[in-house]
């Protein structure tokens, strides 16, 4: 977690770092602000009324002669404490209720569903009233003490967390890990609070930051209309209200400086929520700082002697002396910086035009990490720490994302595992094909649909016109894989990377898909890199085989030679477990 926070901070633009500094400054003033005030914050001085900003009073004085700078320093203690405490109460009440309502709904029983529906309708009635008016009425009825203000703000914000947690739990309760938790005997309550709610917690924490900012604004609004914190307690909304009436006579400072302080406070809490979301989301994409690019460019320029020395050997590994389509040299991928745990180490191989090569190994050997490194799709926090991936003469590591997007699909295509999960569930097959075509060329929708029909016919789908209107859930596994194949081969790429292309398919459909992939690749001279755990696929569909163990290639050879005379003990062990 600390590594993720550190890397998130490195990725932030300077203006967000500045806002983050303001946020922590406000927290500091919340604790120490009243002690730093150079003048009393609640004692009037009639002889110093409405003095303009100057040497003694940096921000001037208000209608009671109190120093505005001192009151601005002390005000965050009131506003922030009210906002934080009210939001904490909202979370403590709303989060458990959201879990309970979601669990009742997920049971599917008539009584439980009716209870949950009734409860949610009541929340909607509450939220139909303007929040500010609702809070003002509550404070007016029960009194304007700080305790009542906190209770009123907590009351109007609690439905936000109920609805948020409910929606997250309803989404997570259908996940496989929830089914597994039920299968081992967990009760519904334990399932909800022990297994599901922790997965929804990051979303709740981000909402907390935003809600605290809103609660501070609501506190200031109530004080502005006279229903909140009473003078002389330093509070930003009350200070703005008392100074606003002097704007007409050009005495602007009593309202301006508290207004700026309030704006910065609310804005900083909102930006902190965005930064918190980046820090808590492991798949977050860093927009401004790409350390993978920096490290890879340094090694690609010759800074790493090992990578430079290994490249010729990787190139020469292509049969027949042809210039390889793909040449990987001394590739390393680690978690985080170069000092993090390495997932793949010293990977080197090459692939000639029209050649097919299999990377085989057990689950967890690093095959899929290798694929994502080649495609430049490594998820955060994984990084290429050294080595090169040459497509022709172009080093893909460190390439600009815009340039890499141009290569994908047109020249480098990928078939990823579990075809149905790769297709957008809310988009028809025709819309996906048209979108993919229009992403790479200017083509009218009508012409794109005609091309889509040709592509579906190419991969052996019957009634292609009918299939254009089908959604992924209406396709069989084999049909979905054929659609993925059509998407991958629409531009006859020079390099096709297939990661477990037959995962989840029955044996008959597996052979059809593999035969189709091989035939289409041969027609266009496409080089194929096949990632599989099945030695049978490697034996029947690939020219060369590389065996991967614990992130390293331990043996590579021509297919017949490797199966006839395996040299590495791990290869012999794997072959002893299967029958090709």
Image (tube, grey):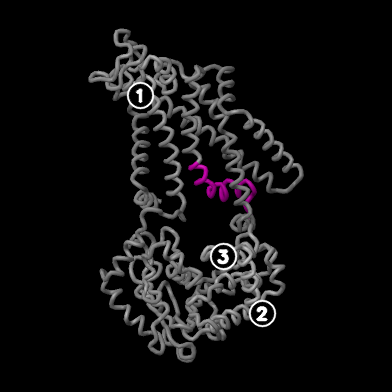
On residue 443, which mark appears? 3
Task: Tell me the residue at 50%/34% (across/down).
Answer: 88
187, above or below 35, in the image: below
Residue named by callout 1: 72
Does the stretch in magenta take in 192?
A: yes
Label 3 sits on a secondary structure element that is loop
Q: Is residue 245 left or right of residue 153?
A: left
Q: CA distance from mark 2 to mark 1?
A: 75 Å
Residue range highlighted in magenta = 185-206
User: Dots 2 and 1: beta carbons under 8 Å?
Assistant: no
569, above or below 249, in the image: below
* Crowd rating for badge 1 (residues with CA inside 10 Å; few <14, some 14–19, many 20+): many
Q: Can the viewer see residue 270?
A: yes
Label 3 vs 1, first from the N-terminus = 1
- Looking at the rendered image, the disc whose residue lies closer to the viewer, 3 or 2, is 3
- The secondary structure that dominates the magenta segment is helix
Label 1 sits on a secondary structure element that is helix
146, above or below 95, in the image: above
The residue nearer to you, when weighing 413 against 90, is 413
Residue named by callout 2: 508
Residue 577 pos. (x, y %) = 53, 82
* Crowd rating for badge 3 (residues with CA inside 10 Å; few <14, some 14–19, many 20+): few
Q: Can the viewer see residue 577?
A: no
């Amino acid at each position: 977690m600390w590594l993720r926070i550190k890397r998130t901070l490195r990725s932030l633009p300077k203006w967000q770092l500045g806002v983050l500094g303001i946020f922590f400054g406000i927290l500091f003033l919340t604790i120490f602000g009243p002690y730093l005030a150079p003048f009393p914050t609640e004692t009037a001085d009639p002889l110093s009324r409405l003095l303009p900003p100057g040497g003694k009073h940096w921000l001037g004085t208000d209608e009671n002669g109190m120093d505005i700078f001192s009151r601005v320093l002390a005000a965050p203690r009131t506003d922030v404490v009210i906002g934080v405490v009210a939001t904490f109460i909202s979370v403590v009440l709303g989060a458990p209720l959201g879990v309970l309502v979601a669990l009742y709904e997920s049971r599917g029983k008539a009584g439980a569903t009716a209870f949950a529906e009734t409860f949610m309708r009541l929340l909607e009635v509450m939220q139909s009233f303007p929040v500010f008016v609702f809070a003002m009425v509550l404070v007016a009825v029960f009194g304007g003490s700080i305790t009542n203000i906190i209770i009123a703000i907590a009351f109007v914000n609690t439905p936000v967390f109920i609805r948020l947690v409910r929606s997250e739990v309803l989404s997570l309760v259908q996940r496989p890990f929830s089914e597994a938790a039920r299968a081992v005997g967990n009760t519904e309550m334990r399932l909800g609070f022990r297994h599901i709610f922790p997965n929804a917690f990051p979303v709740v924490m981000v909402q907390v930051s935003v809600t605290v900012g809103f609660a501070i604004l609501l506190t200031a609004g109530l004080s502005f209309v006279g229903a909140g914190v009473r003078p002389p307690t330093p509070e930003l909304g009350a200070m703005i209200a008392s100074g606003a009436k002097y704007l007409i006579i050009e005495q602007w400072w009593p309202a301006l400086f508290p207004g700026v302080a309030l704006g910065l406070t609310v804005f900083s809490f909102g930006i902190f929520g965005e930064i918190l979301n980046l820090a808590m989301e492991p798949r977050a994409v860093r927009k401004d700082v790409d350390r993978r690019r920096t490290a890879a460019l340094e090694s690609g320029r010759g800074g790493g002697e090992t990578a430079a020395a290994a490249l010729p050997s990787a190139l020469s590994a292509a049969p027949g002396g042809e210039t390889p389509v793909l040449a990987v040299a001394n590739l390393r991928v680690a978690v985080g910086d170069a000092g993090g745990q390495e997932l793949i180490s010293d990977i080197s191989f090459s692939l000639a035009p029209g050649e097919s090569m299999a990377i085989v190994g057990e689950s967890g050997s690093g095959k899929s990490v290798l694929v994502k490194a080649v495609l430049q799709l490594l998820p955060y926090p994984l990084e290429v720490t050294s080595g090169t991936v040459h497509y022709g003469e172009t080093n893909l590591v460190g390439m600009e994302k815009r340039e890499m997007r141009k290569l994908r699909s047109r020249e480098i295509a990928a078939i990823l595992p579990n075809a149905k999960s790769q297709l957008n569930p809310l988009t028809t097959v025709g819309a996906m094909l048209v979108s993919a075509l229009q992403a790479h060329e200017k083509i009218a929708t009508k012409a794109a649909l005609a091309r889509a029909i040709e592509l579906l016919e190419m991969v052996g789908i019957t009634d292609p016109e009918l299939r254009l209107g089908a959604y992924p859930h209406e396709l069989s596994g084999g049909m979905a894989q054929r659609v993925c194949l059509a998407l991958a081969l629409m531009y006859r790429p020079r390099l096709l990377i297939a990661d477990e292309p037959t995962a989840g398919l029955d044996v008959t459909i597996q052979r059809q898909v593999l035969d189709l992939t091989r035939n289409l690749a041969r027609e266009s001279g496409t080089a194929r890199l096949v990632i599989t755990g099945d030695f049978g696929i490697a034996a029947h569909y690939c020219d060369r085989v590389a065996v991967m163990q614990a992130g390293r290639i331990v043996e590579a050879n021509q297919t017949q030679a490797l199966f006839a005379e395996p040299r590495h003990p791990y290869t012999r062990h794997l072959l002893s477990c299967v029958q090709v």
